[in-house]
Amino acid sequence: MAEAANKKTAPRGLRLVAGFQKHWRLHILALPVLIYMLLFSYAPMFGVVLAFEKYTVTRGFFGSEWVGLRNFEFLFATTDAWRITRNTVLYNIAFILLNTTLSVLLALVLNEMYLRRLSKSIQTLLIMPYFLSMSVVAIIVYAFIGPTGVVNSLIKASGQRAMTNWYTYKPLWPFLLVFVNAWKGVGYTAIVYVASISGISQEYYEAAVLDGASKLQQARYVTLPHLRHIIVIMLILSMGGMFRGDMGLSYNVTQNSGALYEVTDVIDTYVYRALKTLGNTGMSTAAGLYQSLVGFVLILISNRVVKHVDEESALF
Amino acid sequence: MKQKQISDNSFAKINRIRPWVNAVFSSVMSVIAVATVIPVVLVFIVSITSSKSLTLRGFSFFPLSTSFTAYQNLFKSGSQLVDSYLITIAITAVHTSVSVMIMTMYAYVLAQQRFAARKFYTFVIFFTMLFSGGLVPSYIINVNVLNLYDSFWILVLTSMVSAFNIIVLRTFISTTIPIELFDAAQIDGANDFTIFWHIVLPLSKAGLATISLFVLVGKWNEWFPGMLYIDNPKLIPLQTMLTRIQQKIDFIKNNSSIASTPDGIAMLKNMPSEQTRMAILVITTVPILFAYPFFQRYFIQGMTIGSVKG
C-alpha cells in the first residue's frame, strides 16, 4: 500500500528506482544465473578479441599484440579449413536426415503397437544408449573393432589371416560415426515423438475413419501434420548446430587416431588440438569464432525461412 | 465422463492395426530393441571373461570360461578408480543441486508476466543459445583470469546453466501453477521469496525431477572438462579416466616403435587389462542405469513439456 502511494507522488524519473525497490527480490532470485552467464558465457564472447591478437599471458586479453586478420588468413590458407568445414557440415546433415527419419518412423510404429506393455518395454530398451557417456561408447566401439574385438575375432574364426587395423581404415568411419550417432540418439527422439503423438486428440482419427481413411492415410494426413511443428523446431535448432562438431564422436570414438583426420576431423577437434597440443590460441580462437558466427547466421536464416513458410513453427 | 472413455476405448479397438501387422511390428521392434542393448551386454561379458579365453577367442559373446578377477583387482588396488568415483559423486551432487536450484529461481522470475525486466532476463539467456565465444576464450578466462585450472570448482561449474532447461522450467511453472495462486499469496502478505519456497518449489516437483535427471546424467557422463582442465590424479572424473586409459593404450599399441621397446612393454604391462577396462566401464555405467527407471515416471511428462515452444 505504502509503495503504491509512493509511486503516485514520486517524480517520473524515479519510477525505475521505485520499480527496482518493489521487485528487488525478483532481481535477487535472478542474480546467480546472471552472474554465471556474465562470467562463463558473456565474458568469453568479448574474449573473441583473441582471434585478432598474438596472445601472451603476461600482457592479457587487451594488452596483447594486435595482428588484425592474420590468424584467419593463416587458418584459411591451410587445407585444414576446408576439410574440417566439410566434415562438420556433412556429418551434421547425415545425422539430421537419418535420425529424424528413423525416429519418426519408429514413433509411428511404436504408437500403433497395441500391446502397450510390450511397446513400453521396447521404448525402455531403445532409450538406453542415450544414457551412456561418449567415453563409454568409445570403448564399446573398441570392443567391436579393436585389435581383439568381435569383428576381428570373427574374421579370424572364418579362417582369414589378414586382420585390419580399423582405426586407420578411412572408408569405414563416415558410416560408423553416423551409425553410432543414430544408435545413441534415435531412441530418445523417437520417444519424444511418441509423447507428442499421444497428445493428438482422438477426434481427428475418428473423423478420418468416418471418411474411410486407412491406417497409412491416417499417419500421412493426421499424425505427420501434427508432428510438423516439433520437427521444424528441432530442425531450426540443429541448423544452429550445423557448424558444431560432436567432440565425443570425432575425438573419443575415433580414439583421436591421426590416420583418420581426413574423414573424422571436425572444427571442434581441430580447435581442441590447436589449443592443447600446439598452444596456438590465436588461430584456434579464430576457428571457433568462424564456427560461432556461421552458426549464428544459419539459425537466423532458417528461422526467417520458417517464418515465411509457416509462421506458427518459427522459434522467435 | 465414463461413457466418453468407453466410446474412446472401443474406437481405439476398431481403429487397431490388423493382428498380423501388429505381430510383424512387434517382432521387428523387439529385434531392434535387443540389438540396441546387445553391445552393452557384450562389454559386460568381456569384463567377466577369463584371460585365457580372451587370448584364444578375443572378445566373444560366448567365452570359454569366466572369471571375476577384473572386479576383484579393481577393488583391491584401484586407488585411482576409488578417487575418481568419489570425486565424480561429489561433483555431480554439488553441481546438480546448485544448478537446478538457481535455474528454477531464474525460471520463476521469467514466469512473472507482469515483471517489466522479464524481457531483459529472457534475452540474457536466449542469446547464449544463438551465439558463443567458443572454447578457447572460455579456456583462457577460466585458466588465466579465474584461476580455475586443476581445481574441483571448474568441474562443478562447467555447463551449470542451460538456457534450454531454464525455458523448460519456466514453461512448466507457468503452465502448472495458476497465476491466481500467486495473487492470492501476495494478498496474504507473501513476498517473492516465500512464494518461491513454499509454492513454486513444492508444486513443480515433477518438472524439477525431470530436469534434475538430465543435469545429473549430463554431469556424470561429462568427460571433456576433465581432459581440458585437470592434471591432478586426485581430481580426474570417471569418464575422463576411462578416455585417458583407452587413449594411452592405443597410442602405445599403434606406435610399434614404442611398443617393442622395453619401456613400451613395461608401460603396456602396467596398463589395466581389457577385462579390467570393461569392468571399469560397467561400474561407471551401472549407477546411471539404476537412476533411469527411478525417474522414468516423470520422464515422458518432462519431455513433453520440453517440446513446448519457448
Image: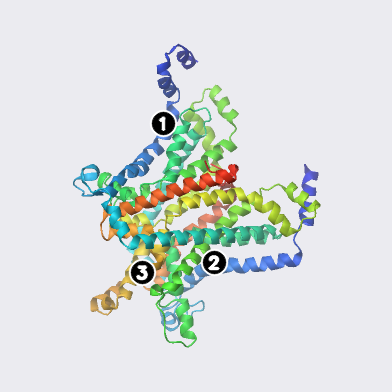
| Label placed on residue A277 | none
Instruction: Identify the chain of the residue marked 2, using the numbered disc in the image.
Output: B
Q: In the rendered view, tell whether residue B256 sits above or below residue B6.
A: below
Front in this rendered view, residue A294 or A59: A294
Check whether the beta carbons of the residues at disc 2 and disc 1 lie within 8 A of each other: no
Instruction: Identify the chain of the residue marked 3, using the numbered disc in the image.
Output: A
What's the residue at 60%, 28% (across, down)? B180
Label 3 sits on a secondary structure element that is loop
Front in this rendered view, residue B27 or B195: B27
Cα–Cα gap, marks 1 and 3: 49 Å
| Label placed on residue B37 | 2
Labels 2 and 3 positioned on one and the same chain:
no
- Disc 1 designates what residue? A28
Label 2 sits on a secondary structure element that is helix
Q: Name the spot of residue A159 as percent of width and height, x first.
A: 47, 88
Residue at the far top in the pictured view: A9
Instruction: Identify the chain of the residue marked 1, using the numbered disc in the image.
Output: A
Can you see residue B298?
A: no
Question: Mark 1: which amino acid?
Answer: Ile
Labels 2 and 1 positioned on one and the same chain:
no
- Decide if residue B82 is on the left or right side of residue B105: left
Cα–Cα gap, marks 2 and 3: 26 Å
